[in-house]
Image (spheres, rainbow, N blue to C red):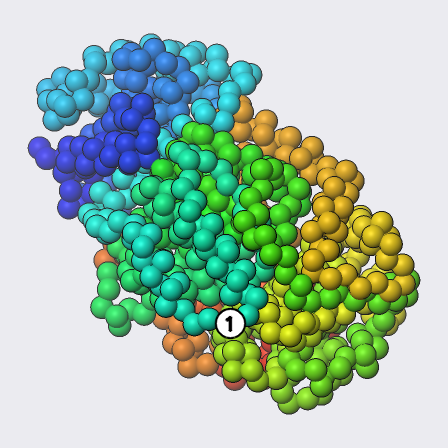
Amino acid sequence: MEFRSHPDKLLKDHLKEVSENAEIYVKEAGRDDLSFYVKIEGGLHDIGKYTNMFQKFISEGKKVDCSDHALISSLIAFNETYRKTSDAVLSFLVTTAVYSHHGHLKGLTEVTNRLLELKYKIRSSNECIVKQYTDLSQKWDQVIKKELEWLELSDLPSLEELVESVTNKIFNLKGKKFGWKEYFDGLLLFSALIDADKHSAAELEEPDLSLPEPEKVIRFVNSLPKYKNYIDEIREELFEWAREKHPEENEIMVLSAPTGSGKTLSGVLVGLKGKKRRLIYSLPFISIIEQTGSVLSNAFDKEYILMYHHLSYNWNETENVDLESRMMLAESWSHPIIVTTFEAFVSSFLSNKNSYLKRLHNLANSFIIFDEVQSLPVEKVALVIEAIKEMNRNLNTGVLLMSATVPFPLENIEKPVKMVPDRYTIHFKELDSYKTPSDLTQLIDLSRGSVMIEMNSVASAEEVYQSLRRKDVQYLSTRVIPKERIKRIFELKEKLNRHENVILVTTQVVEAGVDLDFTTAYRDLGPFDSIVQTAGRVNRNYKNKGDLWVYRIKRKGRERSDFELVYGKITENITLSTLEELSINKNLDLDEKNVEKALSIYFSKVKRYLRPDQSRFVEQTLENIKKLEYDLVDVKLIDQMLKYTVFVEYDDEAKEIWNELNSELNEKIRSGAFAKRAKIKTLIGRAQQYIVNLWEKPEAEYSERLGWFYVPYKEVERHYDKMLGFRTREKDSSEDLIW
């Protein structure tokens, strides 16, 4: 009889492939010490598929009782690992990887509780675990040990002895404190297993590409046009540092350089010289991922670069590609250069999700650039930085953290740009009183070249836009669908590069890293570091000294300022206290050359009053990590997830996507679950271009299958303004929080 793991694959071949590939993965990660453990877990993760029940399921293609195989496989994996190593911790990590390989990674308590239940269940001969063990024990010597001769399997103990031994040894780990090393060992074992498993099942081959040579960046930078002003001197100073910098093995570097100084290409040059196998470039927002990806695509061939975010599955099936393979390669981060979001990067090691953790092994032995690090939520900065430092120690990574406004937990900051730029002045105006958005529009001077007006809330931004009433005013917020938002940013950049006068009303979506250069800007008072980021969009390329005018905004009829509504009273008080310490009363002008001192004061106050490194959230997460409670580790950088997702059938492409997506969801599986999942996920990726997220429930159709609201093409004009984006009939106070 031939035993199969999948309809078209022999089980013995699948187990060997997974074992060998998982072993390759940990060796590429620089962790040869784990190669034995992944060999065992890969070779035994599907051992339960040798049962008659599972083979019947494979042959008939429908659910069969007792065909689930993860639990029995995990027990055998523990037995085999512990017998050969006597290491209870690593044996547990192998066990939970095997037990969890079809779902999220389970922690010590969940596994222990399952084992304690099992001690009672094995008393009944009707239990699946008993039937599976009996079946496997009958095949053990004559079939399994022979087909898996390369594993040199031990003899099976009785089921009672097996369960008793596994339960006792894992139970004894409860209550002990482990470290980041054990935590990352578990993630790496799980990641290598599940990715090797998926690659084997889909018969997927990795792209045979290696990192480009550093000289490619140098040649590209030398080919760029020069502004022939101070900004060229600043960029050359930074790039010269990058030319000379040679990262130490597993060094953590922190780079502080002014906005517009060319951190992207300088950082990439340093990263390529780190002599790692992959470059991971992480950024806070999708708009700057597209921007950064575009820059890097000009420097290198596009095939080397993967831009990964929730819009990244925007592939058209007419391109004649294997969507399943393309999706799996994208999710695994197998490309030489990955450009991704903070959220996707952090979820690769501070999460329990199968689909996130499977790329962890590709982060190992890579060089990681964490750009615009100041955009991390204040209460999570310390935790994320600690995790990155520990990943550096345990997964053989190189790290470069970059920002123009480096937040407080970072030390040993390199500041290679000695020239102190003086491109703008921040004017703080009448901070002891409030302006309404309409009042602000009366103060805006539109005759001074290109102007940006940034508000803290969508409602205020819309009011400013309506008050200006000019055809040439552009608008950005998250109420605008991503397709239009990204398009507008690129169009704005092109107009600004042609020195056309542009007026932009926006929320904070342009704050960090977006390469736009205005003559003048106006902003609602916000966190001090955010004000500095806004100033970074003023005279970015050092043409003529620019101005940022800052006022306090409170909408008519509101008790609280927009600042307090969006960022909270404590952050507002910290910013006002910083300005007071800088002797800013009613009016003050702050030049760029004095910003660094002001930021130092601000961040010291943030640390003193918010104490983010000592928050309950940080303490609880660290406790879960050090107790190996993997299923309880789930760090989201965005806490206030918007409640309602709306698909706007904005154009013909949106119509096509919506129809294909619903057709695929309603169609029964014909070409295999993997292929169907790939098609659906690709369509969802394409659909994300037309999605907005809201706090308030929209008046629109609801799709139970997707959990989305839907605005059909014929209804778009009623729900969606071409410039301002999605509309709601009754404005909810929670709308204040939406960017």
**Which quadrant, please, contains the C terminus?**
bottom right
Rate crowding at label 1 as few (under 14), some (14 to 19) or many (20 or more) other CA atoms within 10 Å.
few
Where residue 736 appears, as percent x and y from the top left, is: 73, 64
Q: Nearer the viewer, residue 356 or 161?
A: 356
Taking the view exactly as shown, the residue that stands out farthest to the left is 1
Q: Residue at x 75, y 59 (%)?
A: 526
**Which quadrant, please, contains the N terminus?**
top left
Residue 659, picture quadrant: bottom left
Q: Residue at x 54, y 60 (%)?
A: 234
Task: Answer left or right for 686 relative to 472.
Answer: left
Task: Answer left or right for 228 relative to 152.
Answer: right
Q: Residue at x 45, y 62 (%)?
A: 292
Q: Identify residue for label 1.
A: 228
Where residue 326 appears, as percent x and y from the top left, is: 29, 57
Where residue 24 appears, as percent x and y from the top left, is: 24, 34
Q: Residue at x 48, y 15 (%)?
A: 173
Taking the view exactly as shown, the residue that stands out farthest to the bottom is 471
Residue 328 visible here: no
Q: Nearer the viewer, residue 218 or 55?
A: 218
Q: Nearer the viewer, residue 80 or 578?
A: 578
